[in-house]
Amino acid sequence: MQETKNKPPCAVCRLVRIYLLVAVPIILIMWIRPEVSRLKGYALTDMFATLIGVMLVCTILWKAYQEFWKPKLDAARKNKN
């Protein structure tokens, strides 16, 4: 018997898999249009926009911490030792 080498899948194969795992269920949900009574009365667009804004602010704060505060803290700790 020949041993099969475990090669990583090609980029096109990964793209097709991602499409099948993400896009197809979204398309099915849009086509079926299920009625979700729990979400009636909520402005989903406003909630999503708020979520995106909060995520943007968190990302900016995280990057500022990594770029500015963390190197200073690490340098201060290094100088103490």
Image: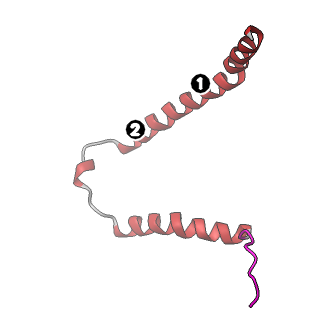
Please tell me which residue is depicted at 76% across the width and 15% down the height of the picture. Answer: 78
Q: Main secondary structure of the magenta part?
A: loop
Q: Position of residue 73 (x, y in %)?
A: 68, 15
Quarter residue 5 falls in: bottom right
33 above or below 79? below
Please tell me which residue is depicted at 39% across the width and 69% down the height of the picture. Answer: 31
Q: Position of residue 27 (x, y in %)?
A: 46, 67
Residue 46 is tagged as 2
47 above or below 20? above
Give the mark nearer the N terminus: 1 vs 2. Answer: 2
* Amino acid at pointer 1: Leu
43 above or below 76? below
Q: Residue furthest left?
A: 37
* Quadrant containing the N terminus in the rendered view: bottom right
Q: Is residue 21 left or right of residue 69?
A: left
The magenta span reads: 1-9
Q: Is residue 37 left or right of residue 66?
A: left
Q: Position of residue 68 (x, y in %)?
A: 70, 19
Q: Which residue is mark 1?
A: 61
- Residue 5 is one of the magenta-drawn residues: yes
